Structures are given as C-alpha cells and as structure tokens.
Image: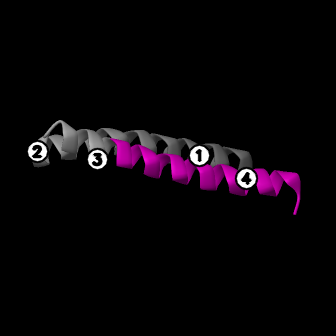
Amino acid sequence: MSPEKFEELMMTAMITVLVGFMAFIVWDLAKKSKAGRFGTMILFLALGLGVLGFVIKTVIIGSLEGL
C-alpha cells in the first residue's frame, strides 16, 4: 500500500471518528443543559451543517481535480 493511499484511508477514518465524537459531545451538552427536543435538534442541525459543508467541499475538490 502506498503512503498516499494509507494517508487517504486514515484521514477518512479519523474524520469519521472526529464527527462521531463531536456528535457525542453535542448530545451530552444537550442532555446536561436540558435543552429539550427542539434545542437538541437545533444543536445537531448546526453540527450537521458543518459536516455537510466539509462533504460538499470534498466533493467539489474531487470533481475539479478530475477535470
């Protein structure tokens, strides 16, 4: 396995772990602050938009490199 392929796989895995950990932190924050259902939904929406932005950026960069 080439170092580039290993780095790509590990980057994907570590980003996934980081997003999962951030989701746990947001859930714990919502639970401890008694945010309720709506507040928890808003917190996860904010996290989801950040993750969506990262995914969109990755897709755009990948499509531009293919041109």
Residue at 29%, 44% (x, y): give it.
28
Q: Going from the N terminus, do you reach mark 3 or mark 1 first?
A: 3
Could you classify mark 4 by the number of other residues whose Cα lies within 10 Å: few (under 14), some (14-19), or many (20 or more)?
Answer: few
Q: Going from the N terminus, do you reach mark 1 or mark 2 first?
A: 2
Residue 16 lies within the magenta run: yes
Q: CA distance from mark 1 to mark 2?
A: 33 Å
Q: CA distance from mark 4 to mark 2?
A: 38 Å
The x and y percentages for residue 42 are 21, 41
Residue 36: numbered disc: 2
The x and y percentages for residue 54 are 51, 42
Amino acid carrying label 2: it is Gly
Question: Mostly what secondary structure, the magenta segment?
Answer: helix
Q: CA distance from mark 3 to mark 4?
A: 29 Å
Could you classify mark 2 by the number of other residues whose Cα lies within 10 Å: few (under 14), some (14-19), or many (20 or more)?
Answer: few
The x and y percentages for residue 14 are 61, 50
Q: Identify which residue, 59 or 29, lies in the foreground.
A: 29
* Helix, strand or loop status at disc 2: helix
Q: Going from the N terminus, do you reach mark 4 or mark 1 first?
A: 4
In the drawing, does residue 61 fall left or right of residue 56? Answer: right
Q: Which residue is the site of mark 3?
A: 27
* Helix, strand or loop status at disc 4: helix
Q: Which residue is the site of mark 4?
A: 8
* Helix, strand or loop status at disc 1: helix
In the drawing, does residue 55 fall left or right of residue 42? Answer: right
In the drawing, does residue 19 fall left or right of residue 34? Answer: right
Point out the frontmost of discs 4 and 2.
Answer: 2
Could you classify mark 1 by the number of other residues whose Cα lies within 10 Å: few (under 14), some (14-19), or many (20 or more)?
Answer: few
Residue 58: numbered disc: 1
Residue 40 lies within the magenta run: no
